[in-house]
Image (tube, grey):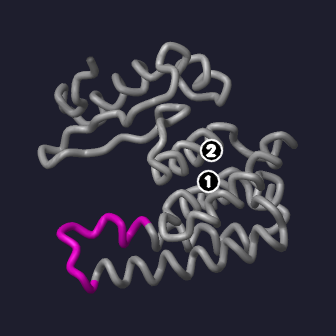
């Protein structure tokens, strides 16, 4: 039960619009411009929410609403300050038991990706021209699964096995050395 269904609905709308535009195949310059305008609108809206209410957690907007806020902030690649500010708000919500710790892992790694430093939780991949994914460099690979477990993430090999199954391609992942 959410305490602010209007906010939850607005976050859902932001996330849906983002995903619709992200999934447009063969984007033209006009498509990209429209996507960037929507992203900028979403970012402004999320700034207001974070300043007024803090992280939109499960109590306020439900699990879906909180996940929608996470999608918006994770895709806010043009506003790195928003991502860092949101991470602080999200950590507070997780500490209060009102948000998903896995979201902290994904947002932390997204911030690391943009800063060009090794990932902490191994959540980000890059894709080559053949559609094959490669895990980006991670800090302390020997303890990666321990860090993932603390954030409620499955071990990396389990995630990658599922990715292969879902994609239907045994070669969807570049082999790690």
**Relative to 39, does residue 58 appear above or below in the rendering?**
above
Q: Quadrant of the C terminus?
A: top left
Reading the image, the residue beneath label 2 is 103
Q: Where is residue 67 shown, x and y percent of the image?
A: 61, 53
CA neighbours of label 2 inside 10 A, class few (<14), some (14 to 19), many (20+): many
Cα gap from disc 1 to disc 2, whole angstroms: 8 Å
**Relative to 65, does residue 24 appear above or below in the rendering?**
below
Please check the rendered image and state whether residue 46 is part of the magenta-colored stretch, yes or no. no
- State if disc 2 and disc 1 touch (CB < 8 Å): yes
Q: Residue furthest left?
A: 130
Frontmost of labels 1 and 2 is: 2
- 17 left or right, relative to 49: left
**164 or 4, which lies in front?**
164
Reading the image, the residue beneath label 1 is 67
Corner quadrant of residue 48: bottom right
Q: Secondary structure at mark 2?
A: helix
Q: Residue at x 77, y 55 (%)?
A: 89
């Amino acid at each position: 039960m959410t305490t602010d269904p209007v906010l939850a609905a607005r976050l859902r709308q932001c996330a849906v619009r983002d995903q619709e535009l992200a999934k447009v195949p063969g984007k033209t310059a006009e498509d990209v411009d429209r996507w960037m305008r929507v992203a900028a609108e979403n970012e402004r809206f999320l700034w207001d929410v974070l300043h007024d209410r803090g992280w939109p957690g499960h109590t306020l907007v439900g699990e879906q609403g909180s996940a929608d806020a996470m999608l918006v902030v994770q895709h806010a690649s043009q506003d790195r300050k928003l991502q860092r500010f949101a991470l602080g708000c999200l950590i507070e919500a997780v500490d209060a038991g009102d948000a998903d710790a896995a979201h902290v892992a994904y947002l932390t790694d997204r911030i690391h990706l943009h800063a060009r430093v090794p990932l902490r939780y191994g959540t980000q991949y890059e894709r080559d021209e053949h559609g094959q994914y490669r895990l980006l460099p991670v800090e302390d690979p020997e303890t990666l699964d321990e860090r993932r477990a603390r954030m409620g993430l499955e071990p990396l090999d389990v995630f990658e096995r599922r990715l292969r199954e879902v994609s239907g391609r045994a070669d969807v992942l570049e082999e790690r050395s």
